[in-house]
Image: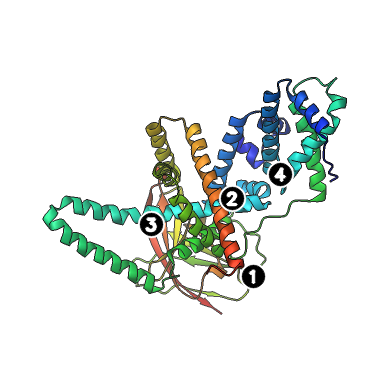
Amino acid sequence: MIRGFLLGTLDEEQQEQVEERLLADADFRREVRAARDELFDEYAGAALSREEREQFERRHLVTEEGRQKLLFAMSLRAHVAARAERPGLLSRLWRLLRAQRFGVALPVAAVLLLALALGVWKLRGSGGPTDSPRRASAERAALELELAALNSEGQGAAATDAPPGAVLPATLVRHLVRGGGTEQKLSVAGGVKVLRVYLVLEADRYQSYRAVLLTGEDAELAAVGGLRPHERDGTRGVTLNLPAHALAPGDYQLRVEGVAARGATAPVGLYPFRLVKE
Amino acid sequence: MKKQQITQKEFDGLLAWLDADTERAGEKYESVRRGLIDMFVYRGCNDPEELADETINRVARKVEKIAPTYEGDPRRYFYGVAKRLHQEYLKQRPPAAWSPPAAMSDELERRLACLDRCIGQLTAENRELVLLYYRDQKKAKIDTRKELCARLNMTSSALRVRVHRIRDQLERCVRRCLGEAAGGNESGGMS
């Protein structure tokens, strides 16, 4: 009921019941605010259907307060994701140290810490997409929000709202040998806004798929899930819409993962391509 | 929208109508005001506090006339006035369509810097709770939250409200931090 109220899908009588309760019940107000937070998180995480996205945008993103809440939800998501990666390395280091006897632990720790420091220095100096991890998180969050909008349920296989000529269709196949095979080149003219990429699946085993956009050097740029397989020209595949402005000319890869029950993912294939701008 | 302040007499009359007991009347007043603000927020209004106050003012100006014969919970009357006010609001300020802010990455980067700082200011327990609560996706997220409920001996609803309170604290902290950063930039003191 609360979710329906926040998305504006209740009938008038139900909406009145909820709103009147807001005036009288502090616990209920807190519940509704908490539920609204979760809707912002779902929107930021591309977990709403297209219809829900539109309903949400109409009610909650038309005010400055709503826009600020969305930016907060996106930054919280990016912060938690970044923290989820770091402890892995530190906890592995900690376990290794604890497994050693004291006499051995110190030199081992010194070597590992030096390696870690060098690794951090290299990462910061390499340039990658940006020199700042925080900047990279911010860019990733912004791109993922855009990908979510372009690929929300009902959008993937159907026409977008983009005018003719603004959408460039392309088909990519999986490469069996990394670095080998025919180069898949996408030539993008100036007016193209969206690359609509059809990724051919050799075997369709999952109800939905996730695509991770990587640079040619395997750096992750963004990910989008909820891609539903469909048929095209006698093949099965998923369609992914990519914003053209977010891709500079160069080499990229799309790593496609099947999403099983409980959200676990399994690799399906790597789809490299080269983007050329005309 | 025509705005006019109310007199002390009108305000006292409003409180008395809500409840004969002064303390309970004050609590109901706060509850009504808070509820009206939330209602206008959820209806996508840009000035929810102003609209809530105008609703209350309009009711206060009419209390002397309607209270003697009104039957039922006075809060329903507030609600009716609020709905009419919302209609007036929509005529004057039709909602603008959503579009993502330009330079969103810049906005997010600033927020991430503030959020890092603000999360660092939480207690260790609250920090861990927030990071665990928002970790994971889909089914794994549901499982993590179930584990948290069991660990903290809370219902999922109570956990959600507890995390919401921490999040509210973080949002306020980030807003203050962004305000400080903007103030610093204006004075040229921060890079």
Of all chains, the one bearing label 4 is B
Q: Nearer the viewer, mark 1 or mark 2?
A: 2
Q: Which image quarter: residue A79?
A: bottom left
- Residue at left offset 70%, top offset 46%: B44
Q: Residues within 10 Å of mark 3 (few under 14, many from 20)?
A: many
Q: Secondary structure at mark 1?
A: loop
Q: Are marks 3 and 2 in contact (CB under 8 Å)?
A: no
For the residues marked 4 and 3, what is the alpha-carbon distance in whole angstroms? 49 Å
Q: Which residue type does callout 2 highlight?
A: Lys
Of all chains, the one bearing label 3 is A
- Residue at left offset 59%, top offset 55%: A155
Which residue is more in the foreground, A252 or B182? B182
For the residues marked 3 and 2, what is the alpha-carbon distance in whole angstroms? 35 Å
Q: Which residue type does callout 3 highlight?
A: Val
Return the mark for residue A69.
Answer: 2
Which residue is more in the foreground, A211 or B32? B32
For the residues marked 4 and 1, what is the alpha-carbon distance in whole angstroms? 43 Å
Q: Residues within 10 Å of mark 2 (few under 14, many from 20)?
A: some
Return the mark for residue A63.
Answer: none
Q: Which residue type does callout 1 highlight?
A: Gly
For the residues marked 4 and 2, what is the alpha-carbon distance in whole angstroms? 15 Å
Residue with the mark numbered 4: B48
Residue with the mark numbered 3: A268
Q: Are marks 4 and 3 on the same chain?
A: no
Return the mark for residue A165.
Answer: 1
Count of marks placed on residues: 4
Q: Which residue type does callout 4 highlight?
A: Pro
Q: Are marks 1 and 3 on the same chain?
A: yes
Q: Secondary structure at mark 2?
A: helix
Mark 1 / mark 3, whichever is N-terminal: 1
Q: Are marks 1 and 3 in contact (CB under 8 Å)?
A: no
